[in-house]
Image (spheres, rainbow, N blue to C red):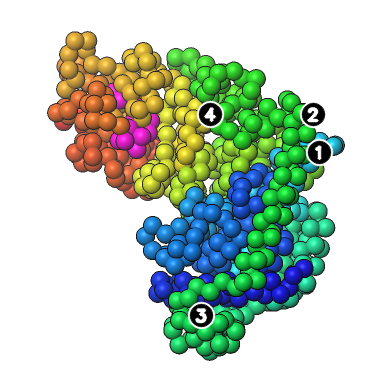
Amino acid sequence: MNTIALEDIALSIRALSMDAIQKANSGHPGLPLGTAELGAILYGEILRHDPADPAWPDRDRFILSAGHGSMLLYSLLYLSGYEDISLDDIKTFRQIGSRAAGHPEYGLVRGIEATSGPLGQGLSMAVGCAIAETMLAVRFNTARRRIVDHYTYVLAGDGCLMEGVSSEAGSLAGRLELGKLIVFYDSNHITIDGSTSLAFTEDVAARYEAYGWQVLRGSMYNFEEIARLVSRAQQETAKPSLIILESTIGKGAPTKQNTADVHGAPLGAEEIAAARAALGIPAGTAGDFYTGAETLKFFTTKREEWKKARQAWQTEFDAWSQEEPDLRKQWDCFHSNAPAPSAGGDSHKRAISLPVFKKGDKIATRSAGNKVLEAISATCPNLVGGSADLKGPNAVGFSTTAYSPTNREGRYIHFGIREFAMAAIANGIQLHGGLRTFCATFMVFSDYLRPALRLSALMDQPVIYVFTHDSIFVGEDGPTHQPIEHLAALRAIPNVRLFRPADAEETAEAWAMAMERHKGPTILALSRQNITVFPKDDPNWQSTIRTGAYIVKKETAGTEPDTVIIATGSEVGMALEAVQLVEQRGKNIRVVSMVSRELFESQPQAIHQSIIPPGKRVICCEAGIKSGWERWARPEDILSVDSFGISGPAGKVAEALGFTAGALAAIINR
């Protein structure tokens, strides 16, 4: 181990971080200054990676869960040779157009494995990465070749371990015996408000030991000790490891280190000058962005070593491909957006044999979704996922065994009652590569996981969210379990596509569209109650529905409608019933199923007008708040539910809230 070079790297990290944050007049210098030694040995000696090929499938993953300390990661990526980030990016830290953004953002720089910053989520996504590694290893490694064999490392701080999501994920990681998950805990006892003792005095080590983790302790500033601790963590195959490293926040800043002042504000020119003198950084202005000569020399040599290691893996992979041609075909399938090789066709739509439902069948869309999931999972063996202890009610069980420490081949994950961690872990599985993932819970509990869903959208990850029990028709469970504002709240997140299918046939197409989407998350909002499969006047509805809406019931042939009813989910059937109640009054009505409002609203005006002719009266009907429907109809022409629900049988609840076919008919007749 070249400790002289590692010390120089740590010095370079501190210099770059101080200067970048000072120039931006914004940022968090405390973490990069306090953890520079860990960063140096992690990127210099521990991580198995190659900056020349950031997407190398068998690289180790590193997630900076404490994303506010982003300058640590940007410095390391730049110094070690990742081409996506330059010194100019670091000099324009936190400025518009700079890849060195305020927190690490997935997609801006190859080498950033996840968008982090919302504390605790990085650690939780790392649990997903570790799960994915075990799933792929058991599928593709053979007695002769190990082509999947890497670790997931995390740097977390006090804030990450205070957030509840990390507790949820940590508990599950221990249960699943994820031995290749190694978390470094930057234990500096300082948060923005001051000492952690203000609100955080628990025995973290005992807590993680209770979760089933191996807990190790050491100093942030002893290279040999860190290397020994990592070696011990790697040798423990049945437990994830938490390595508690005692540190000094802002180390090297003479008057601010070990204080809250250094956590989230620039040091200031005077403190930087004092830090330079104390650390031995060559004299110069505060904007020098110093990089040590030993650092440059060290990483120049290392890049050749990393390249050789990756090429050795590639040689092994090529030999494996020759020995296992069928596995290689499946590997290519897993790491692309294609269905299984045996399925035929060039898209999920053509490759998957979707179940057929009959007109008049009465089936809840959650139950129909289960039949579709079975069909998709048979064709897409890399589809994995599970539910937050609601496998039966969510109807997301499929023909596979459960994933466990003794069965890494299982594709169904029992997440337990941990909605937030479930979604964050699903993000991690998706980010890892090679797998497609879904997760499920009741729609009302989307509130618990919303921050992770937001990161799915921000990172463009195609996680599929199955939210069942989607309306007041949940019934007896009452207002705590009856979604009211949730459809509007979920639609409000940019890049989220929500499908609310109106019957079993639409559910099959909605699942297919979710699988066809490869950028951004998709929500399937599914019913608890049975819904009748209805006839559809559009003969090409399976194609038209991909615009987000289609005509279910046409007006009288050769005429223009005087009224268009837009409905979603179970309310489409209610709209058809309401039309029958008013037909004798001579109304000429068109009924439209808008399975995805945001998808339809993104279509060209010509498509809008072909389905909803301009100048016609529009009535909207959805069992949720009216927010957003004002684009399509006047407030008085929207049948919605704008108060919390009540307990009782579903039909009685609807009557009590005035949400019935009769109420819709009254609006039509108004």
Report the Cα–Cα distance between label 4 and label 1. Answer: 38 Å
Identify the residue under disc 1. 145
First in sequence: mark 4 vs mark 1: 1
Q: Residue furthest left?
A: 615
Identify the residue under disc 2. 323
Q: Name the mark nearer the viewer: 3 or 2.
A: 2
For the residue carrying disc 4, how many other residues have a C-alpha within 10 Å: few (<14), some (14-19), or many (20+)?
many
First in sequence: mark 4 vs mark 2: 2
How many numbered marks, from 0 up?
Answer: 4
Label 4 with label 2: CB-CB less than 8 Å? no
Label 3 with label 4: CB-CB less than 8 Å? no
Q: Position of residue 73 (x, y in %)?
A: 56, 63
Q: Residue furthest top?
A: 557
Report the Cα–Cα distance between label 3 and label 2. Answer: 56 Å
The secondary element bearing badge 3 is classed as helix
Report the Cα–Cα distance between label 1 and label 3. Answer: 48 Å
Q: Which span of residues is magenta-colored? A: 591-602
Q: Amino acid at mark 2?
A: Glu
